[in-house]
């Protein structure tokens, strides 16, 4: 039965990979060649590796493992294996050719197959050629991109072959680009070269820009290296248009970084906008509630070591609950007694922040802890070769907006929100019509604290988690709330994003620290001009 | 009516206490100095130079607390940035001391301080010129923080930024200054600050006599500041200041330009803090940007709160007590200090809104104690 399955599976593979991988002949030949790697000198390796190319996709895992330094020789029987380090320090092994799992071994019973830089270049080249015929368009694309950097005659021939059968438009345009660059370099016919340049128009691949620069380069005496002036002019036009595009995307990138910083500011300030803006309570321990959220993420990660990918999803509600509970506790035990005395509240909550900081330092040690990012949060979204959006920043941006809008819904659509708004507008009247103001106060404070906790989880993805995490953000978040206008959540949104973007646009000019200082000072000056912030609350409630 | 009577009685109280306060202050400082200079080292009455320096440090803190009490206790301006003025005063003194090192530094450059040689600077930045003269440094010590306080106060009070907003703004101010002073490009020694001082006015900073002299200087300055503040607060100016604290709108309607009063008081307080900083630096031998940190500024406030705001001696007692506790705590169990400080913040604000002095006053006058909660509530609402 199993053999039948293997047979069917093998046949499918056979069809898919143009009849190389499962063929017994190739298998045994490959094994023979690969065994030559055992004990081979580095000097002899290129020739052996060259022969591996005939194996096609069957040799691919081995080539890739070799490139990444994961290829080993088992000392006991000289078998070539691929090894991955496990958590206990031993290496999990699979056969390099058949991918059959083998018993794990400690490091000392394996011998690494050595590679040097020259070999790495060769390996990349071979992998590119082998994967050029892959069924997966993404793999083909990266193969072509690899080849772009090394346009040997052989590669050009293969690309020309591949062009005939290529169906994916992205890969197609890359192949055309590669061929065009080749024409530009080798051909003497002006019309051909001009049409090659036409193909390259608007491409943001770094290799295109380099090719154009090489075309326009001058020698030391100031003579142009390129004799043909028509080609030169055309190249100059192209280079300028590409440069403009690169500048534009550079600006977009700055904007993205600014929005990303703004989203972090929004997250840390939203909780404060509720406790300070809506309730009028100055909570200097807000930063420490953020820190508690971040440590919750750390603890959740410790508790579920087998599901690191999803621990962050568990951590978000947990952090909300933990930080919210701490917030309610603070409100019930301290802030309640200081109602209507904002300056005293400020001092008392500052005391609480010191206690919380020291408590965390005693429990978790003063050292920074790291929260592992799940794989779906790492990496980046590549929109074009010069403009990437890293996933963690992108997700945090979306997450911050999501939290903000959920909060808006809670405040505008639920009975708790109605009560909160009633109490914040006129406490006595709210009390008179039967709203339990004490309870509403505690819940509001819990809500604001819970959001601080969520912000902590998000921050744990960007920085290390330490006892001083909150301190770094407390002044910034107060600035955002005061700048946006107390009592106005939309003001907080606008304030956070404008400060974030402004900061990131100042940074390249002035440096990070000076940008920070300039922003602080300008907010101080702004508040003198408009003491109630960007969007002041109107009406009697503001008094 | 009740408030006015209270103010009169407390002023009366202070007038009675000023001579007593001065007697206690000079009694202790002179005794400690004498025991340091003239008692042999093996005697049990000997006071070590370390203790003298420590006491001198406490006196500087007391002066700083006095500065905060003047604005917070009497005018309701809770400044969370007085550490900035203290540090600025300290830096002016530090710059003078730095220039006094001359060619005795590690690199032996006659003009440039060590850190500038290290950063490969060729000449002295313009703002360092003249700091080899003591009087220039003293002038800068008064002018720089005074000017900063004037500009900040003028902008803030004129546009009626008050209460919590003002507190947060002052905190942002000291935070911005801290970030700025951490930069090497600023020319104040960056992260390491200014240190390795050799002598002041030609006297070596290491000698016992100079230490004692600095200690006595601190005591004299504290006494002068105390008496001056006492006089200011019992003058017509002081009455207006207190009326601003209790009911600013009413004071404005009567016709006082309250912002002018507030700015003047803020500048006076900033200069007191700067003097404290300038006395502090030669005694501890270092000034670095850490002094600007918001935590330091807020600690000053808690000294005042513990002692009892609105009573000048309360601030001084609070500063001495809390700092003594800090020295003991950090020596015995360092981890517990932040717990203790935090608990102090919380318990003082909830249980002792008038500080220790309020407690004492309550004990002496049982009728006052009976209405203690009411009196507390009154001033609380009005300082907001």
Image: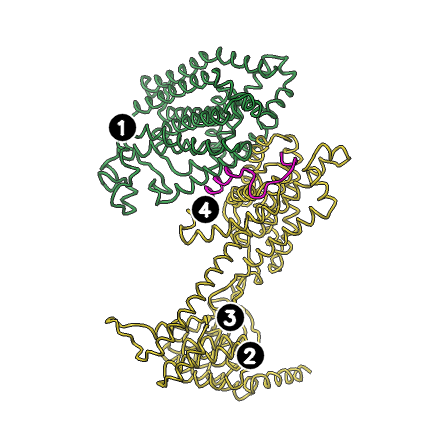
Q: Are marks 3 and 1 in contact (CB under 8 Å)?
A: no
- Chain letter, colour green: B
Residue A536 part of the magenta segment: yes
Counting other residues with Cα less than 10 Å from the Cα at mark 1, is it few (<14), some (14-19), or many (20 or more)? some
Q: Give the label on residue A83, or none.
A: 3
Q: Which residue is under mark 4? A: A516
Look at chain A in the picture and name its colour.
Answer: yellow
Which residue reaches farthest right?
A434
Residue A131 part of the magenta segment: no
Name the chain under label 2. A
Specify start and end residues of the magenta stretch as a single range.
A519-543
Q: Secondary structure at mark 1?
A: strand
Of callouts 2 and 4, the N-terminal one:
2
* Distance from the alpha carbon under mark 1 to that under mark 2: 82 Å
* Distance from the alpha carbon under mark 2 to that under mark 4: 47 Å
Q: Which residue is under mark 1? A: B204
Q: Give the label on residue B263, or none.
A: none
Same chain assignment for discs 3 and 1: no
Name the chain under label 3. A
Q: Is residue A77 visible?
A: no
């Amino acid at each position: 039965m199993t053999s039948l399955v293997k047979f069917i599976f093998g046949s499918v593979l056979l069809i898919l990979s143009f009849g190389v991988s499962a063929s017994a002949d190739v298998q045994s030949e490959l094994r023979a060649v690969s065994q030559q790697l055992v004990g081979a000198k580095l000097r002899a390796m290129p020739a052996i590796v060259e022969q591996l190319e005939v194996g096609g996709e069957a040799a691919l895992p081995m080539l890739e493992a070799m490139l990444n330094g994961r290829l080993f020789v088992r000392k006991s029987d000289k078998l070539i294996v691929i090894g991955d380090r496990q958590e206990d320090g031993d290496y999990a092994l699979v056969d390099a050719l058949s991918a059959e799992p083998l018993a794990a071994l400690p490091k000392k019973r394996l011998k690494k197959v050595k590679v040097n830089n020259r070999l790495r270049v060769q390996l990349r080249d071979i992998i590119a050629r082998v994967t050029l015929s892959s069924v997966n368009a993404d793999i083909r694309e990266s193969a072509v991109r690899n080849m772009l950097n090394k346009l040997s005659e052989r590669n050009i021939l293969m690309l020309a072959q591949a062009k005939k059968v290529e169906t994916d438009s992205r890969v197609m345009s890359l192949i055309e680009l590669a061929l065009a660059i080749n024409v530009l370099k080798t051909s003497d016919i002006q019309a051909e070269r001009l049409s090659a340049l036409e193909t390259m128009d608007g491409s943001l691949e770094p290799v295109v820009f380099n090719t154009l620069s090489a075309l326009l380069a001058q020698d030391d005496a100031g003579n142009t290296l390129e004799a043909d002036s028509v080609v030169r002019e055309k190249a100059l036009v192209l280079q300028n248009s590409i440069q403009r595009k690169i500048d534009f995307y550079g600006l977009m990138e700055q904007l993205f970084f600014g929005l990303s910083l703004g989203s972090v500011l929004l997250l840390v300030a939203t909780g404060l906008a509720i406790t300070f803006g809506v309730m009028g309570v100055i909570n200097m321990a807000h930063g420490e509630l953020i820190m508690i959220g971040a440590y919750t993420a750390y603890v959740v990660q410790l508790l579920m070591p087998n599901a690191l990918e999803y621990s962050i999803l568990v951590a978000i509600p947990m952090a909300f609950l933990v930080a919210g509970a701490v917030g309610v506790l603070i409100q019930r035990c301290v802030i309640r007694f200081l109602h209507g005395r904002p300056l005293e509240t400020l001092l008392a909550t500052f005391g609480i922040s010191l206690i919380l900081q020291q408590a965390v330092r005693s429990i978790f040690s003063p050292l920074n802890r790291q929260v592992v990012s799940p794989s779906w949060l790492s990496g980046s979204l590549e929109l074009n070769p010069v403009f990437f959006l890293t996933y963690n920043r992108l997700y945090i941006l979306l997450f911050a907006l999501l939290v903000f809008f959920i909060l808006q819904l809670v405040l505008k659509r639920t009975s708790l929100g109605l009560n909160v708004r009633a109490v914040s507008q006129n406490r006595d009247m709210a009390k008179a019509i039967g709203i339990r103001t004490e309870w509403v106060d505690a819940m509001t404070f819990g809500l604001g604290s819970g959001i601080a906790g969520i912000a902590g989880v998000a921050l744990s993805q960007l920085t290390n988690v330490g006892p001083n995490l909150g301190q770094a953000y407390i002044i910034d978040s107060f600035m955002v709330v005061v700048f946006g206008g107390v009592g106005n959540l939309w003001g907080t949104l606008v304030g956070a994003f404008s400060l974030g973007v402004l900061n990131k646009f100042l940074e390249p000019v002035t440096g990070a620290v000076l940008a920070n200082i300039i922003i602080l000072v300008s907010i101080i000056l702004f508040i003198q001009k408009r003491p109630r912030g960007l969007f002041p609350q109107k009406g009697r409630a503001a008094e | 009516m009740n408030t006015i009577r209270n103010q009169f009685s407390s002023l009366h109280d202070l007038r009675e206490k000023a001579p007593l306060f001065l007697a206690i202050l000079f009694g202790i400082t002179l005794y400690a100095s004498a025991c340091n200079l003239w008692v042999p080292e093996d005697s049990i009455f000997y006071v070590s130079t370390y203790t003298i320096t420590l006491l001198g440090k406490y006196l500087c803190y007391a002066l700083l607390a006095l500065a905060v009490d003047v604005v917070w206790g009497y005018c309701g301006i809770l400044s969370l940035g007085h550490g900035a003025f203290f540090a600025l005063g300290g830096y002016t003194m530090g710059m003078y001391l730095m220039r006094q090192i001359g060619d005795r530094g590690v690199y032996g450059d006659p003009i440039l301080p060590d850190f500038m040689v290290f950063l490969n600077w060729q000449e002295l930045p313009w703002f360092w010129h003249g700091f080899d003269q003591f009087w220039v440094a003293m002038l800068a010590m008064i002018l720089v923080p005074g000017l900063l306080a004037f500009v900040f106060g003028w902008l803030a009070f004129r546009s009626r930024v008050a209460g919590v907003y003002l507190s947060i703004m002052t905190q942002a101010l000291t935070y911005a200054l801290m970030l700025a002073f951490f930069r090497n490009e600023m020319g104040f020694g960056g992260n390491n600050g200014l240190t390795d001082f050799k002598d002041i006015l030609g006297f070596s900073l290491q000698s016992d006599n100079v230490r004692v002299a600095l200690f006595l200087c601190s005591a004299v300055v504290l006494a002068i500041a105390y008496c001056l503040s006492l006089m200011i607060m019992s003058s017509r100016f002081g009455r207006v200041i207190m009326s601003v604290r209790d009911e600013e709108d009413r004071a404005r309607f009567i016709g006082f330009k309250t912002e002018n009063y507030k700015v003047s008081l803020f500048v006076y307080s900033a200069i007191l803090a700067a003097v404290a900083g300038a006395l502090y630096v030669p005694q501890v031998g270092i000034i670095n940007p850490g002094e600007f940190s918001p935590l330091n500024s807020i600690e000053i406030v808690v000294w005042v709160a513990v002692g009892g705001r609105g009573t000048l001696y309360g601030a001084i007692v609070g500063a001495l007590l809390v700092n003594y506790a800090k020295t003991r705590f950090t020596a015995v169990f360092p981890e517990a200090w932040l717990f203790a400080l935090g608990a102090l913040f919380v318990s003082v604000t909830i249980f002792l809104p008038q500080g220790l002095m309020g407690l004492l006053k309550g004990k002496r006058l049982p009728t006052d104690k009976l209405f203690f909660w009411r009196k507390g509530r009154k001033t609380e609402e009005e300082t907001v």
